[in-house]
Amino acid sequence: MPKAARAARANGAPGETVETVETEERAFSGWGRTSPSRAAVIAPDEEADVFGTVLRAAEVRNGAQRRGVIARGLGRSYGDAAQCAGGVVVDTKNLSRIGPIDPDTGVVEVGAGVSLDALLRVGLQSGWFIPVSPGTRQVTIGGAIAADIHGKNHHTEGSFCRHVSSVTLATPVGIHEVGPDNDPELFWATAGGMGLTGIVMRAVVSMRKVETSWMRVDTERHDDLDSLMTGLERVDRLNRYSVAWVDCGAVGSRLGRGVLDAGNHASGSELPAKHKDDPLAPPRRRGLKIPSLVPPGVVNPLTVAAFNEAWFHKSSSRTGQLRHLGGFFHPLDAVSNWNLVFGRRGFVQYQFVVGDAHRDVIPQAIEILQKAGAPCTLAVLKRFGPGDPGPLSFPIPGWTLALDLPVGPPGLRSALLRLDGIVAGAGGRVYLAKDARLEPSTFAAMYPRLDEFNLVRQRVDPEGMLQSDLARRLGICEDSRP
């Protein structure tokens, strides 16, 4: 890979000694592997390098082009949020310090490059669990804040940034310590702001106390979507965590049939004898890998239908199952590169949310994709509670459906465009951390507080240095509008 030596002033003051920064150019793509682009990459060794070297290196590299700089963690955004074509990508992997966890409160200071997996493993040693977990542990703290991630407990405890009391943020004008009570405008713009307000260097997070690493889970199998949604509403009143798998291939009276899981952390007294010796055992390390060359056409309507049929009939309604938290929260983490199963074309994950008054959009979405001949390999339905104050934070109270859709069917693009209009018309929105194909006008309709976000952003980035492929595609920042 080509390398280019770039000059950058350590502090940016005229006349200072100039140091050389090596930037390696690489190709980047999101987890869906649909929109690759090339950028220089820098991995700062410590926090002091983020402002003093990285941002200045980006300025020198970009020059008049102003291609910008964006942070990147483990690359689990599905689209182009952590890419910056022609600019600089900041790899946060070396910002990996985990401080001591307060034994009374569970509060811990962690570096932006720390993964949820690493924090979870350290926390479990003394009985602490991450406050919000998405469907994978392979997300960094910086990414969790930038996307304001949500999990199976949103209906009870909200998104990740509800559990963050402080963020240290490097912006083009300096270092900022922000939180819900300290410059809340910048803090909440950062929560869900997709890295466009600055580079997160570290954060203070509140963990949850647990007695074991096991979950007590109730499973319900429902024969149609209405029954499934009613079941979710019911179990949400009784359980901290809930989620439903939906069979998007079922038609007629079986449309939207699925399997619902609801759970709570198991206590020590609930464990059988075989687990009592190690009640806080961490999840197993990933052991399976998809071959790098997957034959084309493996994921097609027939294989997806066969899988859904088998999965539905394999599941049965049961109460009080004991399930390790790794399998309950992160089943796909057992396969380290499962995204390769979709082949060279990749896939789109389309996740949207609509309010309770528009629950009819859920069956509409399934029917639209069925008519388009677009097989959905995985569909996950959840309930959201109140959203965060961030102008670009995704959750609003209501229903969210996430759909994994292989690229290829000729009717997929028009089906998703139609669905965009329906979601926007219902006052809903698409999740930016999953998006790879929204139009700027649709995005603006879904996120009506964009101007409010830009006012905050301009305060800390007046020259528009913080950019990404997603920002340029959607026109999020005035400096990057097409």
Image: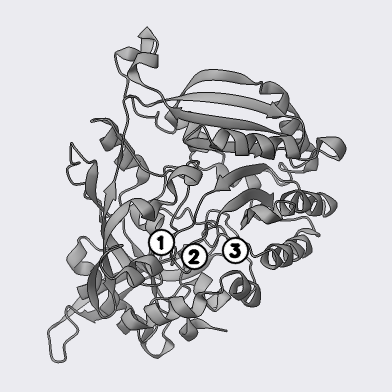
- The answer to whether residue 465 shows anywhere in this view is no
| Three-letter code for the amino acid on which mark 3 is drawn | Ala
Q: Residue at x 45, y 55 (%)?
A: 75
The N terminus appears in which quarter of the rendering? Answer: bottom left
Tell me: residue 365, above or below residue 218: below
Instruction: Kindly check if marks 3 and 2 are in contact, taking CB atoms under 8 A apart as contact.
Output: no
Give the number of the mark in front: 3 or 1. Answer: 1
Near-viewer residue (17 or 68):
68
* The quarter of the displayed image where residue 298 is located: top right
Disc ID at residue 308: none
Residue corresponding to mark 2: 81
Residue corresponding to mark 1: 146
Q: Percent x, y for residue 16?
A: 12, 86
Disc ID at residue 436: 3
| Three-letter code for the amino acid on which mark 1 is drawn | Ala
**Circle 2 — which element?**
loop
| CA distance for labels 3 and 1 | 16 Å
Q: Percent x, y for residue 192?
A: 44, 63
Q: Is residue 37 left or right of residue 271?
A: right
Name the N-terminal-most of marks 1 and 2. 2
Tell me: residue 173, above or below residue 435: below
Q: Residue at x 18, y 46 (%)?
A: 99
Near-viewer residue (242 or 56):
242
Give the number of the mark in front: 1 or 2. Answer: 1
| CA distance for labels 3 and 2 | 8 Å
